[in-house]
């Protein structure tokens, strides 16, 4: 039987890669649709998957504390990036790369506690179920990360690099959870809530705002609804 950390890494990487493949085809669409659609994906993941899991783990108070910390962390990371010069071919590409960096940071924080939970609680006899679940869960994450990356002009090499960055914390978390059997739901919920706040702030303050600059509010809302619906069919109807 393969170790849980390896199964987690392979499943996460496969889902991220499939999402990246879908993002490769999306790059030919209008930027406004792609960004509004990605906003819907993020909000759908938060509302349908991440927030219910967080409330089940830690309850309302931990949710409020974690979200508050996440909002403050988002603005701190945002402030740091404002002082970093990203050299690309245009200011629009710089914006895409800023979005990629922020999203990657959010995914990195999110995947570590997820890995800890999987490594601690997952029975290895259910590894095939976990494999499918992780793949499906990470497809929208791959779309969200790699759409702005491809729009910035980067290709498959960058996809592989960022996939490794995103996969590493879930593998490490699974390994640590399996070895030490960490069962502190409030800590895990707090970390998850930080991720929720960072991702939602990115969606609203970075991605959706940029979509509005490229198109009308009604079209952006409709495109976002399509993204939200995509997550619904992936997570709720699986």
Image (cartoon, helix red, strand yellow):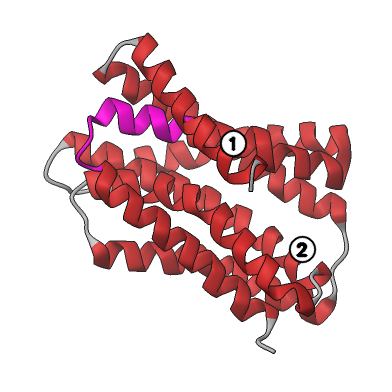
Q: Main secondary structure of the magenta part?
A: helix
Residue visible at 53% across and 55% down in the picture: 138
Decide which of 149, 135 is in the foreground and name it.
Answer: 135
Q: Position of residue 188 (x, y in %)?
A: 78, 54
Q: N-terminal of the two: label 2 or label 1?
A: 2
Q: Position of residue 174 (x, y in %)?
A: 69, 72
Q: In the rendered view, does 121 fall on the left or right side of 174?
A: right
Residue visible at 79% across and 70% down in the picture: 122
Report, in whole angstroms, how far the alpha carbon at label 2 lies from the one at label 1. Answer: 23 Å
Callout 1 environment at 10 Å: few (<14), some (14 to 19), or many (20+)?
some
Q: Position of residue 97 (x, y in %)?
A: 30, 45
Q: In the rendered view, does 178 fall on the left or right side of 90?
A: right
Callout 2 environment at 10 Å: few (<14), some (14 to 19), or many (20+)?
many
Q: Position of residue 182 (x, y in %)?
A: 84, 69
Residue visible at 27% across and 51% down in the picture: 24
Q: Residue furthest bottom?
A: 1
Q: Which mark is residue 170?
A: none
Decide which of 97, 235 is in the foreground and name it.
Answer: 235
Q: In the structure shown, which secondary structural element does the residue marked by tag 2 occupy?
A: helix
Whether residue 185 is in magenta: the answer is: no
User: Mark 2 — residue?
Assistant: 117
* Tag nearer the camera, 2 or 1: 1
User: Mark 1 — residue?
Assistant: 232
Image quadrant of residue 49? top right
Residue 131 visible? The answer is yes
**Considering the image in quadrants, where does the N terminus appear?**
bottom right
Q: Is residue 107 above or below residue 76?
A: below
Q: Is residue 190 above or below residue 162?
A: above
Whether residue 32 is in magenta: the answer is: yes
Q: How many marks?
A: 2
Q: Is residue 68 above or below residue 222?
A: below
Q: Which residues are magenta?
A: 27-40
């Amino acid at each position: 039987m393969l170790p849980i950390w390896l199964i987690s890494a392979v499943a996460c990487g496969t889902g991220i890669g499939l999402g990246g493949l879908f993002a490769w085809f999306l790059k030919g669409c209008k930027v406004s649709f792609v960004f509004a659609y990605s906003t819907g994906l993020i909000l759908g993941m938060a509302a349908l998957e991440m927030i219910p899991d967080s409330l089940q783990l830690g309850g309302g108070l931990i949710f409020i504390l974690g979200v508050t910390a996440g909002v403050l962390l988002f603005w701190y990371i945002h402030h740091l990036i404002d002082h970093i010069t990203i050299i690309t071919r245009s200011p629009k590409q710089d914006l895409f790369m800023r979005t990629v960096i922020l999203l990657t940071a959010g995914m990195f924080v999110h995947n570590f506690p997820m890995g800890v939970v999987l490594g601690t609680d997952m029975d290895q006899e259910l590894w095939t179920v976990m494999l499918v679940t992780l793949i499906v869960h990470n497809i929208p994450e791959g779309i969200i990360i790699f759409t702005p990356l491809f729009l910035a002009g980067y290709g498959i090499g960058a996809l592989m690099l960022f996939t490794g960055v995103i996969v590493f914390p879930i593998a490490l978390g699974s390994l640590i959870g399996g070895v030490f059997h960490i069962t502190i739901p409030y800590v895990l919920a707090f970390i998850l809530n930080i991720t929720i706040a960072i991702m939602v702030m990115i969606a609203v303050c970075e991605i959706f705002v940029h979509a509005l600059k490229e198109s009308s509010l009604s079209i952006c809302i409709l495109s976002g609804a399509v993204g939200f619906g995509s997550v619904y069919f992936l997570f709720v109807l699986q």
